[in-house]
Amino acid sequence: MTDWRANAREVLAEGPAALVTILATEGSAPRGAGARMLVTRETLRGTIGGGALEHQVTAQARAILDHPPGSWRIQDYPLGPLLGQCCGGRVRLMVERLASVPAEGPHLVSLGETIIRKPHSGDSMPRLGARGPLPGPGAIFLDPVETDSRPVLLFGAGHVATALVERAAGLPLRTAWYDSREALAQRQGVVLASEEELVACAGEAAADTAVLIVTHDHALDYRLVTAALRSPALFVGMIGSRTKRARFISRLAADGVDTARLTCPIGLPGIAGKEPEVIAIAVLAQLLSLRNAT
């Protein structure tokens, strides 16, 4: 669940809910620390995985709905014969009876104000382990994040870009979507900017960022590719044929731009198809494969 706060606000609008968070794992486990699941009396949103584990924890979460808002429990689950599983790992999780959803800030305080969860960061505070004494009232620990989201700068709002955005929901990607055409000003999620602003944005891509260029204009593509390749961006990808790639490579080399990081055509090799939906899935798979590169 990439945005548990937004999801929690939605379910709380309809009645009581509990939040299940995996705090730590050891050995083989179905999900990592930071995986979350929202539980109401009738529904589930998100998953912590594990089949029998999730079934038992769902029952525990529904039981806590009968307790006052702010109630919480932390429990360890060995993933062995007790649950009819053979993973051999171990999971420590927290179940909280929600009343409202705290805004992100210097600290995230559990709703009973008895456990303080600091936002995930690079500081020296250790994460919780999956063994040892359970945290009690007053404990302070880093709020776990299962997978850090990859920043993506997406330039162009045509059919392929739209298919990309529609299918990226739930993936560990944070997409900023841009176009320069006035006709797209009302499309949800698209940031309208001048071509000069788009080029400047591409040139400021950070070292952990993926840049995707799928605009309607080859001249604009060239300006964006040039700017992105001169940035420290982790990935620079452009839609196009092998002929377009060859022409761009030749021109970029003449302009003194290192083209070693340019990926064109985009999309994971082996996934063939020209349909926007197929291209979108191939590109999203390619972006997810970047997790192995950092």
Image (cartoon, grey):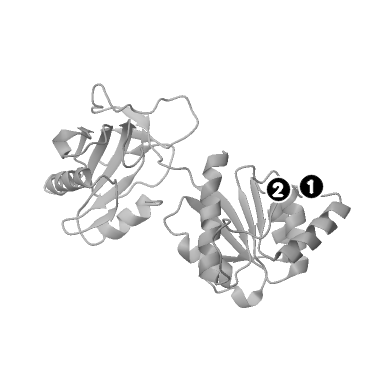
Report helix, strand or loop for mark 1: loop
Which quarter of the figure has residue 84?
top left
Pick out the residue farthest to the bottom.
183
Q: Residue at x 55, y 74 (%)?
A: 186
Pick out the residue farthest to the right.
254
Residue closest to the eye, 199 or 72:
199
**Mark 1 crowdedness (10 Å alpha carbons): few <14, some 14-19, many ≥20:** some
Residue that numbered label 2 is attached to = 261
User: Contact, CB < 8 Å: mark 1 with mark 2?
Assistant: yes
Report helix, strand or loop for mark 2: loop
Task: Give left or right: position of 204 versus 84.
Answer: right
Task: Give left or right: position of 119 versus 17.
Answer: right
Pick out the residue farthest to the front.
270
Residue 215 visible in this rendered orientation of the protein = yes
Residue 112 visible in this rendered orientation of the protein = no
Which quarter of the figure has residue 153?
bottom right
Q: CA distance from mark 1 to mark 2?
A: 8 Å
Residue 52 % position (x, y):
19, 45
Residue closest to the eye, 262 or 135:
262
Q: Residue at x 61, y 47 (%)?
A: 209
What is the number of the mark on residue 258?
1
Type of amino acid under label 1:
Asp
Residue 253 % position (x, y):
84, 52
Residue 75 % position (x, y):
20, 33
